[in-house]
Amino acid sequence: MKKIRWKYRGKKMVKKLLPLFAPLILSPVAIPAGQSVAKSDPHRIKSKLMSYRVMKFDQLAYTLYEEMQLQGEGLRFEVFNKALAGYYNLKHEGKLSDKGIITMVDFTKSSREKRLWVVDVHNKELLFNTYVSHGRNSGEEFAESFSNDSESYMSSIGFYVTEETYYGKHGLSLKLNGMDEAYNTNALDRCIVMHGADYASEAFIAQQGRLGRSLGCPALPMGEHKDIINAVQGQTTLYIHASDDSYTSHYLDHANALAEMVHENKLELPTNPKEPGDVAEEGLASI
C-alpha cells in the first residue's frame, strides 16, 4: 500500500498545486480552417457542441491525471478518464457524498500487480495503491470473465456506490451498490463487498505465482483494508474496469460530466444560444 502526500523535492512543505480548471475551461477550441458553422443545420451544430464538450472534459481530466502523477503509479489514463466521468455523472444524480473520493480497479492488469487506486479529487491526492483480488471463476492470474449472476463466483464490472460498513466473517467489510444494469446491480444480493483477505498478499503471490481469488468480492490485503474501507465508505465512487467491449454505461456521458464538473468547481462556460442557428463560429469554438 502506498499512502502518498505530494511534496516539493528537498522541502517538507506540502506541494501547492496550481489551479486546475480555469485556464483550460476558458481556452478556445479552434474550428479547422475552411470550415464554418451552417446556421441551417441545427443537428450538425448540436453534434459539434457535444464533441467540443467531450474534448473539454478530456482536457481537464488529463490535466488532473498529470498533476497527480498517476501514470507513474501505474494507472492508465483511459481508466482514470472513465472513472472521473462516472464520478461526475453520479454526483449529478445526487448519489454521492461530498467526500470527492474515487476508487478504481483495473482488471486488465495481472493480479500480481497493484491494480487498485484510491484518489481524492478535491485535494488532488493519491491516497492508496495496492493489490485487489478478482472472483475465482473470472480467471487465474487475469480476470477475463464477468457476471452479474448469483453464485457465479465471478467479479462484476462497472460503477458502484459504496454504502455502510459492517463486521462479518472477514472482519470489517464494506457494502457495494452496483449502478450498471445487467453488469453489477445484483451486488448487494450477491453480498459482493470490499473486505480483507490473507490471500490478497505478496506472500501468496510468491507462493502461487498470482494473487488469491475471492467469490466475486474485491478483496484487499489484510493490514491495509481497514484504512481503505474507512476512507471510501459512505457514498463514494468505485469503478471496476475490464477489457470488455460489450460494457456500456450512461455514467460514461462525458458531456454531462463536464457540466457537473463546471458546477462543482464554480466555473463558467459560455451560455448556449437560444436557437442553434444563432451560434456564431467564435461562440461555438469557445464552448
Image (tube, rainbow, N blue to C red):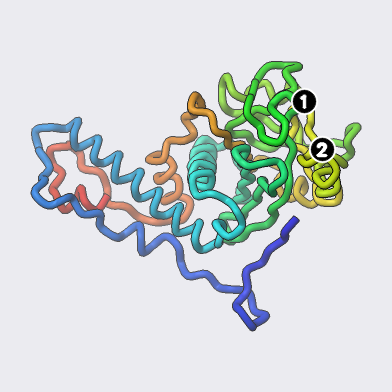
**As drawn, is 194 to the left or to the right of 182?**
right
Q: Which mark is residue 173?
A: 2
Q: Is residue 252 above or below residue 284?
A: above
Q: Residue at x 67, y 30 (%)?
A: 177
Q: Is residue 94 visible?
A: yes
Residue at the spot x=66%, y=67% of the render?
5
Residue in the picture at 62% in, 69% down: 6
How far across and down, in percent of the image, does residue 66 sit? Answer: 49, 61
User: To which quarter of the image does residue 120 belong?
Assistant: bottom right
Q: Position of residue 81 (x, y in %)?
A: 48, 46
x and y percent of residue 190 in the render? 75, 21
In the depicted structure, whether residue 229 falls above or below residue 10:
above
User: CB under 8 Å between callouts 1 and 2?
Assistant: no
Q: Which numbered tag is attached to residue 139?
A: none
Q: How far is disc 1 from disc 2 in space, using C-alphas?
A: 10 Å
Please give the residue where the numbered disc 1 appears in the rendered image.
191
x 74%, y 37%: residue: 133
